[in-house]
């Protein structure tokens, strides 16, 4: 009887550990990222919207200070510039269309959370904070507004209007 109880407890604990580890793995995606024109990321065949922000339409622009020239929205070009390797996203929610919302960062390690990509865009004025986003995002948006950068003004950053 004691042996059966021990086996039952062992199996129950094993199942709990497997369920916990599966949910943790499913809640984070880490790999190379491709930046879509709308500022979303494409990681492991999943479209990921950056958590807590909205990226307004800024039209198409081109980075002329690099070769080959890359064109896209200002936010997507800023992300292309910032992302130089792996992106780690903690998945916050899944949308009805199958896309994900994630808190994504670059240069993350066991010792550092890395750079928050939503905060990066907010600081440069290429995104606005969502009303239910973190208070830090609200503050970063206000700072960008006061500085007159990004969608709040004009900045010289190696971009040129796209000509077709």
Image: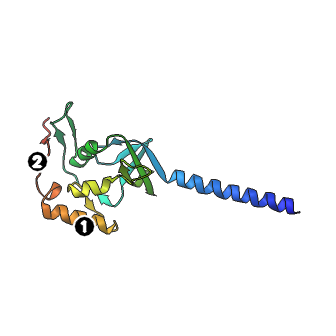
Q: Position of residue 64 (x, y in %)?
A: 15, 36
Residue 158 as seen in the image, left or right of residue 95 = left
Would you identify the image quadrant in which residue 130 lies?
bottom left
Q: Residue at x 53, y 51 (%)?
A: 25
Give the spatial CA distance, label 2 vs label 1.
23 Å
Mark linked to residue 115: none
Residue density around tag 2, few if under 14, some if 14–19, many if 20 or more, within 10 Å: few
Query: In the image, is residue 28 above or below residue 145?
Result: above
Residue at numbered disc 1: 139
Task: Indicate the secondary structure of the residue bearing disc 1.
Answer: helix
| Quarter of the image where the N terminus is located | bottom right
Q: Which percent across, then down, holds residue 67?
A: 20, 31
Q: Is residue 161 above or below residue 132?
A: above
| Quadrant including the C terminus | top left
Q: Residue at x 16, y 63 (%)?
A: 145
Residue 82, horizontal then vertical, whole percent: 28, 45
Residue lying farthest to the top in this orientation: 68
Q: Is residue 131 visible?
A: no
Q: Nearer the viewer, residue 23 or 130?
A: 23
- State left or right for residue 158 relative to residue 141: left
View extreme (front): residue: 111
Whether residue 43 is visible = yes
Query: Mark 1 or mark 2, which is nearer the start of the sequence?
Result: 1
* Residue drawn where x is 68% and y is 56% of the image: 15
Q: Are marks 2 and 1 in contact (CB under 8 Å)?
A: no
| Residue at the extreme right of the image, as rendered | 1
Query: What residue is rendered at 23% in x and 57% in y?
Result: 123
Residue, disc 2: 156
Q: Please state the horizontal and vertical placement of residue 153, each as a whole percent of the image.
A: 11, 57
Q: Judging from the image, what secondary structure is the residue with disc 2 in?
A: loop
């Amino acid at each position: 009887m004691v042996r059966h109880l021990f086996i039952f407890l062992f199996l129950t604990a094993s199942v709990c550990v497997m369920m916990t580890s599966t949910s943790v793995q499913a809640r984070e995606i880490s790999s190379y990222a491709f930046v879509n024109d709308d500022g979303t990321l494409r990681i492991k065949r999943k479209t990921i919207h950056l958590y807590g922000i909205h990226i307004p339409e800024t039209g198409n622009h081109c980075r002329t200070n690099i070769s080959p020239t890359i064109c896209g929205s200002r936010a997507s070009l800023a992300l292309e510039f910032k992302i130089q390797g792996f992106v780690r996203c903690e998945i916050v929610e899944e949308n009805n269309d199958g896309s994900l919302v994630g808190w994504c960062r670059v240069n993350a390690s066991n010792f550092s959370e890395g750079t928050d990509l939503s905060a990066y865009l907010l600081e440069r004025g290429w995104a606005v904070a969502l009303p239910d986003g973190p208070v830090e995002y609200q503050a970063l948006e206000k700072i960008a507004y006061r500085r007159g950068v990004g969608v709040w003004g004009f900045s010289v950053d190696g971009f040129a209007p796209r000509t077709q």
